[in-house]
Image (cartoon, rainbow, N blue to C red):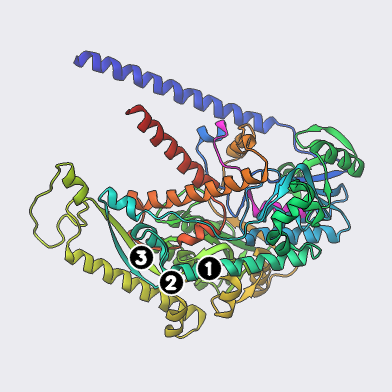
Amino acid sequence: MKTLGLIWRFIVGIKDLLVLALLVVFFIAVSAALSGASPATVPESGALVVSLDGAIVDQGSETSPFDTVSGNVGSEAQLRDIVRGIDRAAADSRIKALVLDLDLFAGGGQANIAAVTEAIGRFRKSGKPVHAWATAYSDDSWLLAAGANRIWLNPLGGVIFTGPGGSRLYFARALEKLQIDVNVFRVGTYKSFVEPYTRASASPEAKAADQALASSLWNSWLADVKRLRPTADVPSFIAQLPQRLGQAGGDGARAALNAKLVDQLASRDDFDAAMVKLVGDGDLEYWGHYAGVTLTDYLSATASQDKNGGDAVGVVYVSGNIVDGEAPRGTAGSTTIRHALEEALNENPGIKALVVRVDSGGGSVTASEEIRAALISAKAGGLPVVASFGPVAASGGYWVGTAADEIFAQPSTITGSIGVFAILPSFPRALNDLGINSDGVKTTPYSGEPDVVAGLSPEVRQVLQMGVENTYQQFINLVAKARKLPVAEVDRIAQGRVWAGTEAQRLKLVDTMGGLDAAIAAAARKAGIKGEVRVIDIEKPEPAWVKALKNFGSSETEQQARDPWARLLLASRQRLLSSMADFAFLASGRGATIQAACLECSAAGSPRPATARASADTVSKLAALAQSSR
């Protein structure tokens, strides 16, 4: 038997070696193909085609080679690329129009949508038209389209608005049935992150705060609508939807046209024909027959226009859950960010100021502090630091932002959530029911603690609660010093409560309304940089071969239904899966014990397609396991 085991291990080793060799050959071939590929070109007369087949994010998520090749990834477009491409095309005489293909758009957070609509507005000021087309529109996609000269809608589609809000999962009853004890240590009246694990529904305080946030975000959205498309009476359309549908014979597309939410009903073929008339005929591409160039190809073809010399502003990206140590793109690993910042400053003496771009609901307290400390160190070296808050900059995300001399946010930015908590699950009752017991010896009250088998000792509970309270005190002291506010005032507006950007400005938690471009301009002024500002992105780079391979895989979104209710169902499913991922992360023990994180931000902030996809894969595996065990 021993001999057979050795032979089997030898065979498995040979198999693994062959697989590794094939992968090496494959990536060498891809690299060679990339180096020899024809450069992207821009037609002499055509449209810039921005197909948003997925979500707008601040920083694209990192994927494994296998997922990249298979297309098993959630499609994402980086905000900076969209804005840079549209702004560049505005001054390019070859680009005659901008086409927004929003058929599979999955959202982007209101703050990022606002940044794109501002870029669209600048494009229109150049005298060039903007056209948007989709089978169906909902809140995010329609708001993005509202900046266009003309909104086109498939005759079989429709427009449905929902507004912020929706359901949230509460696990307390399930945990009780499984006899899992959730040990919670918290500070903050409104720190509702822990409530899904301790309650069957929201507390009155949490619900009131959530309602206030949702109402503020909705008012901000309506204000953007009024500015972009004043003829559209969205509140009336929502209030009278059944009647308006009845008047249109149940035709959702016709009801949207009658309400002036769209300008023209047209199939994709009809839209294609109209664009051919506008910009000319071209080779058949996935978008149609009209002459055009994709955003990716356009940025590649015009890369020589990027400013490569002179003084610069470095933009440090803090995106996703904040965790200790190294982490892939799309997750804010504190060590990864610190190393990237130190390396960038060492290799680029031209960096004269920093902008920290935050799109994060927080996470580990120690990781948030490591990132903040790295920024403070750069400030000590004479660099001005400005913070730009994206769709979400709450809890640990706000902790990071306190390093800045000035904080920019959008009216719809979700921020605040200045509070701290710790969660530790234990399983004494569940294990006892299975006939599993624990016993042992101790030399101190803390031997073997935290004991998830027998339960936490009273001493450990006391120490953890004191640690959470101390961390909260450090948090509000940090905010008070950075914002020049009395500690008592910070404590009053903190307590874990989440605020929209407009309210946060009133409370002096942020300074100025504006997007990333405004923050970069402010940082340049503080550093005395004149003229066009060179921008250096400071982050973990994405390998070139990964970028190329993403084009080979077919994204999951390509097989998704396009009708309005299907799009809403997809968004709801992604929010649900993201919440499940948050729960699984905390329950796994992989995260920090003491957290400054915001649960409501995951539902109201930026879409997280990569997180949702990973959670969906986990659910599928669990379902398959359950099926096989029957």
- Report whether 225 appears left or right of 275: left
- Report whether 191 appears left or right of 470: right
Residue indicated by mark 3: 421
Q: CA distance from mark 1 to mark 2?
A: 10 Å
- Residue in view at x 19 percent, y 16 percent: 2
- Which segment is the magenta one? 70-86
SS type, badge 1: helix
| Type of the residue with mark 3 | Phe
Could you say which is closer to the camera, residue 65 or residue 71? Answer: 71
Look at the image and tell me in which quarter the N terminus lies: top left
Q: Is residue 10 above or below residue 419?
A: above
Q: Magenta stretch containing residue 526, yes or no?
A: no
Residue indicated by mark 1: 211
Please indicate, yes or no, whether residue 307 appears anywhere in the rendered image: no
Which is more N-terminal, label 2 or label 1?
2
SS type, badge 3: strand
| Type of the residue with mark 1 | Gln
Within-10-Å neighbours for mark 3: few <14, some 14–19, many 20+: many
Give residue 584's position: percent from left, percent from top.
Answer: 38, 48
Which is more N-terminal, label 3 or label 1?
1
Give residue 575's position: percent from left, percent from top.
Answer: 52, 51
Give residue 581's position: percent from left, percent from top.
Answer: 43, 48
Look at the image and tell me in which quarter the C terminus lies: top left
| Type of the residue with mark 2 | Glu
